Amino acid sequence: SARTATKRAGGTVRNHGGSPGKRLGIKKFSDEHVIPGNIIVRQRGSQFHPGQHVKMGRDHTIYATSPGFVRFHKERWMRTDRKYVGIVLTRGEKLPRDDTNLGRSRHFGLVDVKNAA
């Protein structure tokens, strides 16, 4: 109980200085080329939802599963619009994709065995 005066003399602080930023946000923007594993969006909660050729990690990070170009789009969900992130295989493609007319967009990642060195 002898230290009380010295501890009290230290005073108080109001706003505590805060904590460092967590580097969240969009890492790859629309039309940027990505390869599998590239992080596209770091986020808290699901502000962006995964579209085609992307997946969501357990901390809601959205990452690429195939090579291509990033596309952002909105789709109606219940009474609001959901923001989606997807990957298209060629630069001119748009999302959401009309699969009935255009067919599915797939990346096969095949290796040419005949010309492999």
Image (cartoon, grey):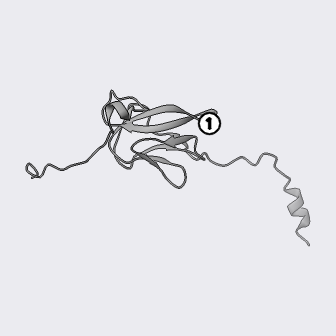
Residue 24 drawn at (x, y percent) = 55, 43
Position of residue 88 measured from the top left corner of the image (x, y, whole percent): 36, 36
- Give whichever of 102, 14 is nearer the camera: 102
Report x, y in % for residue 22. Answer: 58, 47
Residue type at tag 1: Met
Give the left or right position of residue 77, taking residue 69 as reference.
right
In the rendered image, the quadrant that contains the N terminus is: bottom right
Residue under label 1, please give it. 78
| Left or right side of 40 for 102 | left
Residue at image location 54% in from the left, 35% down from the top: 83
Q: Quadrant of residue 86?
A: top left
Residue at 88%, 68% in the rendered image: 3
Residue 54 locus on image (x, y percent): 42, 45
Q: Name the side, left or right, on which 33 lies relative to 15.
A: left
Label tally: 1
Secondary element under disc 1, as helix, strand or loop, is loop
Q: Is residue 6 above or below residue 60?
A: below
At a point 33% along the width and 27% down the height, the residue shown is 92
**48 or 43, which is in the foreground?**
48
Query: Who is closer to the viewer here, 14 or 71?
Result: 71
From this view, report whether residue 14 is shown above or below residue 86: below
- Residue furthest to the front in view is 100
**Furthest residue in direction top, as rendered:** 92
Query: In the figure, 42 relative to 102: above or below?
Result: below
Q: Residues within 10 Å of mark 1 (few under 14, many from 20)?
A: few
